[in-house]
Image (spheres, rainbow, N blue to C red):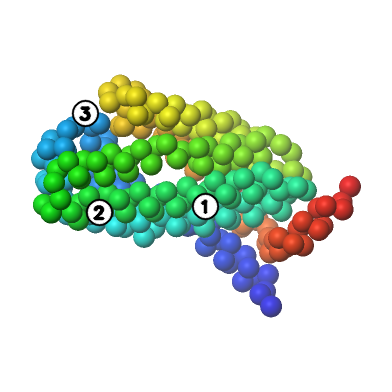
Amino acid sequence: MISEESNNYWQKIAAWCGPVYAAVFIIFWGVLGHNLPPPSATFGPQELMDKYYLPYHDQILLGNVVSCVFGMGYCIWSAQLGIMMWKREKYPILAWTQIIGGVLTGWVLTEVPAMWVTCAYMTGTLSAEHIWALHTEAWFIWTQTVWITWIQVFAAGVFAFLKHGEPRLFPKWCGWVGMASALTITPWFLVPYHKTGPFSIGGLEVFWGAYGAWILFFVSFSVPMLQNLKRVRIPAVPGIGQAISRNQFEA
């Protein structure tokens, strides 16, 4: 049987997976992968090759490979956040919504960089048009599946607003951060209609505003998670069957 001390130890590791992933993502995908900002959506096939994949080939390849490796860290962090929410909810719909959104987001954070790895790997082998098409498809998957992240940040934000016992797991203002993050990623459905401006790939709202709000969301929830794990020892969450049977018959 797993001891309480061992259980708490693994939960701390899970909580730290998020900050570690965020740091890796910014350094390797953002800086090394030359995505601060990403290449313009106005680039044609040959321009994308000449200004992005050819001059920065090795850095793009390494940056996205490392991003793939660490992408699952976001899943683990989301699972830990969901566990902590679950322990406070009588009917854990917000916890499950957050977990589902976070796990699917983690998949996107692994799958899409793998597509950019393919672009870099195939540079010089495939035509510029093929590379451009795959590169653009990756960005559309990245932005048009954002609704799975939307439900995650929205569910976490709603949870922070509600009172689930004392002391509160998250301060109430975290709820506003969650709502702000959901609001800033909502316009991402406009990306296919704009090659320039704030709603384009790398645009002021779609890139800088949305990622800034997401980082604020991430930090705002990570700090209380880590503080709470230092304060108390959290027992393991009951199995799914136990939780359903327990909640079904409670008043």
Q: Which of marks 3 and 2 is nearer the N terminus?
A: 3
Q: Which residue lies furthest to the bottom in this view?
A: 1
From this view, report whether residue 14 is shown above or below residue 33: below
Question: Residue 221 at x, y = what percent?
Answer: 56, 44
Tag 1's secondary structure? helix
Question: Residue 45 at x, y = what percent?
Answer: 16, 37
From this view, report whether residue 112 is shown above or below residue 12: above
Calculate the distance from the C-alpha at mark 3 to the C-alpha at mark 1: 32 Å
Depth check, mark 2 against mark 1: the one in front is: 2
Question: Left or right: 125 with respect to 65?
Answer: left
| Residue bearing the label numbered 3 | 42
Q: Earlier in the sequence, mark 2 or mark 1?
A: 1
| Residue bearing the label numbered 1 | 103
Q: Which of marks 3 and 1 is nearer the N terminus?
A: 3
Question: Residue 57 at x, y = what percent?
Answer: 16, 51
Q: In which quarter of the image is the N terminus?
A: bottom right
Query: Residue at 35% of width from left, 49% of height from top?
Result: 112
Tag 3's secondary structure? loop
**Pointer 1 local density, CA inside 10 Å: few below 14, some 14–19, many at least 20:** many
Task: Determine which quarter of the picture holds residue 73.
Answer: bottom left
| Residue bearing the label numbered 2 | 118
Question: In the rendered structure, which amino acid carries the disc numbered 1?
Answer: Val
Label tally: 3
Calculate the distance from the C-alpha at mark 3 to the C-alpha at mark 2: 21 Å
Tag 2's secondary structure? helix
Question: In the rendered structure, which amino acid carries the disc numbered 3?
Answer: Thr
